[in-house]
Amino acid sequence: MDQVINEQKVMNKIFWRLTPLMVFLYIVSYLDRVNVGFAALTMNKDIGLSPVMYGLGAGIFFWGYFLFEIPSNLIMSKVGARIWIARILFTWGLVAIAMAWVQGPKSFLTMRFILGVAEAGFFPGVILYWTYWFPARYRARIISYFMLAIPLSFGIGGPISTGIMALMHGALGLKGWQWLFIMEGLPALLLPIVVYLWLPDKPKDAKWLTEAEKKWLEHELEADREQVSVKKTEVSVGKTLMSPMVWALCIIYFARTGSNYGLGLFMPQIIKAQGYTNMQTGWIMVIPYVIGCIAMLAFGWSSDRRKERKYHLLIAFVLITGGLWGAGLLGPTTASLVVLCVATIGINGSNPPFWPLPSAYLKGPAAAAGIALVNSVGNLGGFAGPYMLGWAKQFSTNFSSGLYMLGCLGVIGFFVTLFAVKSQKVDNLAPQTPQKPAAVQGD
């Protein structure tokens, strides 16, 4: 007999079952990769890191990420999300804790690279995982909720990280920055069992969905897969890796990621240079990233509501460039914090309209490879941004010249988006069912 399916009820059920855990995992992931920015407030002097060496080490994480991203995502598509994500968590937890015992530039560079290897595959794996659960018309919003972890990590990471460094300094003979790495790495060691027990690989494995809900969801996802294509056909992994569109997306994400990590990993030092203490710096860091959270949700909602990606991205890149160049022009002043907030609006607002694009052009194994390629190549911006800013700081008295250089990444992202991304609404964002409960065959 026919059984009526309430679409919103099913989507809410999936959202509340999966999204909170995924957001928490991403917060843990981000804290373990960006806490080095707070550790640098005292660590750099302790182990003899110059600004350029710190920038190199902060960014070299992404070379490890780059080299192992695609293999990791392809493995996940074969062995399942819960096993592979649990493995990634445990591995990066071990390495994150081991960061507490770096002794100098060489060990710092080595451990940051290994941390990138350990985390490779987590983010694109989750993006791929969402395609198993949410129809395309929901994905910008879901990605915006998931990626709230980024500004949240920078925001809550400030007071938490500086608090750990202040309170734990000297305990058991360890410095504050060493305790920072240990305490923020521990959750990744404890969470794999939660992931394994809580996450189903695909809807057919979800005991909390009825058979009718599973059938409806698979129908919706299959309708998406039939429309998603490059020339409406399934493209091989090899052709995907050579696709001009995929490489354009790589450049766009490179520009966005370079500005994000360049600013984020140096922002504690930029703020402290205005005369604040470590604790004050940690709390001030909350402000731009709370604003970034709001911007991410607003861009995701607007992008899905209008079923449009390109112009949301263009606006985001204008804000990135304007904010970074404005901060460089104002120099180490309180007013520069205001325009840095503008930059964080653009950085965080660019994610929701961007990440539905790879799955809007690719399907099948090509989607797994394409998403991983975009994320791995794009994340090399996470190497370039901090290195550029550290290199520029080495030859000047403040961060202005480095902020100008980061702003140029926004210009690159703007023009590649302008000429490479189609301006029409993505076809597969249109609802596949009427705006009323759908009827499916039930038992």
Image (cartoon, helix red, strand yellow):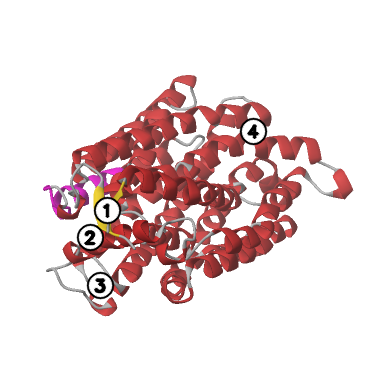
> Tag 4: Cα neighbours inside 10 Å, few (<14), some, or many (≥20)?
many
Outermost residue, right direction? 172
Q: Which residue is mark 1?
A: 136
Spatial separation of the CA atoms under disc 2 and disc 4: 43 Å
Q: Which mark is residue 224?
A: 2
Identified at 61% across, 24% down, the residue is 275
What amino acid type is highlighted by mark number 2?
Answer: Asp
Secondary structure type for disc 3 = helix
Q: Which mark is residue 159?
A: 4
- Nearest to the observer: residue 98 or residue 156: 156
Horizontal arrangement in the rendering, residue 252 relative to residue 168 (left or right): left
Q: Specify start and end residues of the magenta stretch as a single range.
A: 410-424
Q: Which mark is residue 240?
A: 3
Spatial separation of the CA atoms under disc 2 and disc 1: 7 Å
Spatial separation of the CA atoms under disc 1 and disc 3: 20 Å
Identified at 57% across, 54% down, the residue is 53
What amino acid type is highlighted by mark number 1?
Answer: Ala
What amino acid type is highlighted by mark number 4?
Answer: Pro
Spatial separation of the CA atoms under disc 3 and disc 2: 19 Å
Identified at 44% across, 34% down, the residue is 293
Residue 405 appears in view: no
Q: Are marks 1 and 3 in contact (CB under 8 Å)?
A: no
> Tag 2: Cα neighbours inside 10 Å, few (<14), some, or many (≥20)?
many
Identified at 54% across, 35% down, the residue is 155
Q: Are marks 2 and 1 in contact (CB under 8 Å)?
A: yes
Above or below, comparing residue 336 to residue 143 in the picture: above
Q: Which numbered mark, 1 or 4, is in the foreground of this view?
A: 1
> Tag 1: Cα neighbours inside 10 Å, few (<14), some, or many (≥20)?
many
